[in-house]
Image (tube, grey):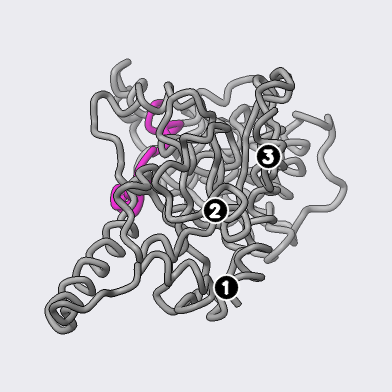
Amino acid sequence: MDPLSVLREYAGRGDLDKIIFSGDDILFGSDYSFPANVATAFASKQSGRPYPLSAAVFLAQHNDLKHTDFLQAARLRRIPPVSLPDRKTFLDFLQFGHNTLPTEPLLPSFTQEAHPPPPPPEEPDDDEASTAHVRAIERPLKDRNSILDARGRDFLAIYHAVLRREEERVRNKDSAPSAGRTEPSAAAAALANPKADKSLGDGFVPIILVPSASQTLITIYNVRDFLEDFVFVPSDEKVRALKGSPKPECVTVQKKHVRSGAGGPVAFEVRDKPASLKPDDWARVVAVFVLGKEWQFKDWPFKDHVDIFNKVIGFFVRFEDDSVDSAKVVKQWNVKIISISKNKRHQDRPAALEVWERLEEFVRRTLK
């Protein structure tokens, strides 16, 4: 007796639930018993190898699952899964699509003599049946690799901070200025020659400044969502998600197609406390998200906003339906205005990409 013919007969009668996996055998009610790993005439279109009976029975009993869920369930039961191209062919054979057997077998005809079934096993109780069903359809959410994924944690900024502290310690120890000698402002010297000591991929990490004021759209809380994930998330939502945790001093953002001369992705530090910047830090500032208020630039080591935006690229992010007055002051500056929608989040991506495009162009032009 061909096991596929028996399976097709059970499928036609709606008796698939009477087929039971029992150890290394498959019991078709009390009528037939076949080895679970016996080869069938149902073969893979891709490899030509026959599927075992266990694969055919499992597909027949779980044909209502999505294919991805079916593959996961089969692997959990250690049953060879039927591929997507073969799935429809076999289900049609089982009368789910056609009512007649194929005129030619998928492989040379194979028959398996049925042998008398062993003594009927103990019927599983309801709890065991329920547990088996749950395990067949369950999907693992984490594995040993995903447990080690520290998504949302930023260790690059900590690494760069440690390097800067060590460099400053060595510099202060070995090169203290002579007594009575008047040294020029280090910040002024660095800014007077913005290309000096700036080489991407050689330890130079550019800095982007954002406002610390709550009324601005882009802050240190949501800048990574906007520039890395291309989606605007209101700052108050990000603050609530922190659940009382302190505000980060610095975050790092990257974009793969903004590359250094060495070919690796460029990391940008984002900060919102200009007063804490040292002269060497100011020499690394390449961009600023503006608030639209003159007082934002108080105590910056520049002559005025004209001098600022000749050496630093500026961005002003606003909602597209805000009043014209909201950008009245900004329009007088050499700043790029980026408009986003209050509700249409799919429009955030082109806005963020425009920021990256102009930032990449500025960095390439000024730091090459």
Tag 3's secondary structure? helix
Q: Is residue 1 above or below residue 302?
A: above
Magenta stretch? 133-151
N-terminal-most mark, 1 or 3:
3
Label 1 sits on what residue type?
Answer: Leu
Residue pointed to by mark 2: 287
Mark 1 vs mark 2, CA separation in Å: 13 Å
Magenta span includes 148: yes
Tag 2's secondary structure? strand
Circle 2 crowding by C-alpha within 10 Å: few under 14, some 14–19, many from 20:
many
Label 3 sits on what residue type?
Answer: Ser
Q: From the viewer's side, name the closer residue of 164 and 52.
A: 164
- Foreground disc of the pair 1, 3: 1
Looking at the picture, how far across and down is residue 243, in whole percent?
27, 24
Label 2 sits on what residue type?
Answer: Ala
Specify whether residue 73 is in view. Answer: no
Looking at the picture, how far across and down is residue 146, in whole percent?
35, 49
Residue pointed to by mark 3: 5
